[in-house]
Amino acid sequence: MKKLKLKKLAAIDIGSNAIRLLIANTYIENKNLTYKKISLIRLPIRLGNDVFTKGKISKNNINNLIKSAEAFKSIMKIHNVSRYIAVATSAMREAQNAKQTLDEIYKKTKLKIRIISGDIEAAYILQLFKNNLNIKNENYLFIDVGGGSTEINLLSNGKIIASESFKIGTVRLIKNFDNNMLNDLSDWINRKTIKIKNIIVIGTGGNANKILKISNKNPYEIIKLNYLSDLFMKVKNYTINERIIKLKLNPDRADVIEPALEIYTNALKYSNSNKFMVPRIGLADALILSLNKANVKGNNLDWQFENIFKLFNLGVFVF
């Protein structure tokens, strides 16, 4: 039996509500690309608080990012990570001082970070699902709810029918609630799905994962609309402290789970779906797989991710 060729890779996702470091082993098993998570570190640095109210990242959070980057680099070295990629999403996209912030982080830590668009963010996540679901025979509405944006992909019989990135996210909503934002998203879903039946809504992101945990369901297990609606009303009627105690939520999750539930519930209602599914994978997982350069004959997953890098001119960094 051949010895497994393990590649230890890392992905850093700098979002609007938190930043994450995922480290994983990737290897080939039965000609299939496989990965196993080794470590996932999440830090509650809420850049959206700065950007969605003042338009730029505060000096305090710049310092927090620098400290986090230093810590992440040390952790990656301890794990002997061979390659990593670091990306920033919605809050960094909109921050007036984004370039200065990233330049300062690189100057102090040598950590290279790329800002990616909402469309690229959605493309990464979508590619991740192509080898995990029977997309050729089903209709899926993929919805990734972040702190500052929501990415949606509609697939029917294996083809992308519609795709959109909305400037609506959980942190943005609690800071500056605008019902028109929700209405625009709901109207778009209704228009694009009106002729498509039996849609399964796929939810990704930290809030979707927390909903899965609260529901006591397994990944990919169906959650019905009634349950989701009831949970939304329950959460809405709870105080922040009650959410922390009764639902065992962290403080930085307790406030944003309500708008997330509203977005997911609306997605089901306006797509006329009764099936909600959470795979517990997201952007960081997609980034990990995109780093793997193994060429597996008959498996085009690598090809898809490698070409995302070429298409969007992203960089892979080596220690």
Image: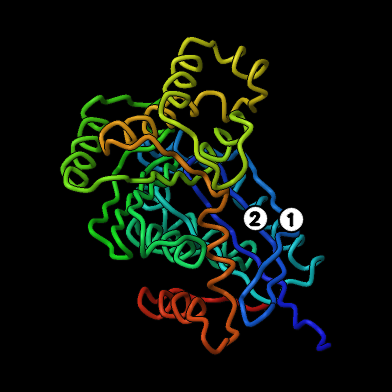
State the separation of the CA atoms marked 1 and 2. Answer: 8 Å
Q: Residue 284, percent across and down?
A: 56, 58
Q: Quadrant of the C terminus?
A: bottom right
Question: In the structure shown, which secondary structural element does the residue marked by tag 2 occupy?
Answer: strand
Q: Amino acid at mark 2?
A: Leu
Cβ–Cβ below 8 Å for labels 1 and 2? yes
Q: Nearer the viewer, mark 1 or mark 2?
A: 1
Q: Quadrant of the N terminus?
A: bottom right
Q: Residue at x 17, y 47 (%)?
A: 195
Q: Nearer the viewer, residue 286 or 33?
A: 33
In the image, taking residue 319 as reference, residue 79 lies left or right, namely right
Q: Nearer the viewer, residue 296 or 48?
A: 296
Q: Nearer the viewer, residue 195 or 39?
A: 195
Q: Which residue is mark 1?
A: 39
Q: Residues within 10 Å of mark 1 (few under 14, many from 20)?
A: few
In the image, taking residue 174 as reference, residue 9 lies left or right, namely right
In this rendering, the answer to whether 189 lies above or below 180 is below
Q: Residue at x 49, y 28 (%)?
A: 256
Q: Residue 297, percent across and down?
A: 54, 89
Q: Residue at x 67, y 23 (%)?
A: 248
Q: Amino acid at mark 1?
A: Ser
In the image, taking residue 261 as reference, residue 112 lies left or right, namely right
- First in sequence: mark 1 or mark 2? 2
Q: Residue at x 23, y 41 (%)?
A: 189
In this rendering, the answer to whether 38 lies above or below 216 is below
Q: Which residue is mark 2?
A: 21
Question: In the structure shown, which secondary structural element does the residue marked by tag 1 occupy?
Answer: strand
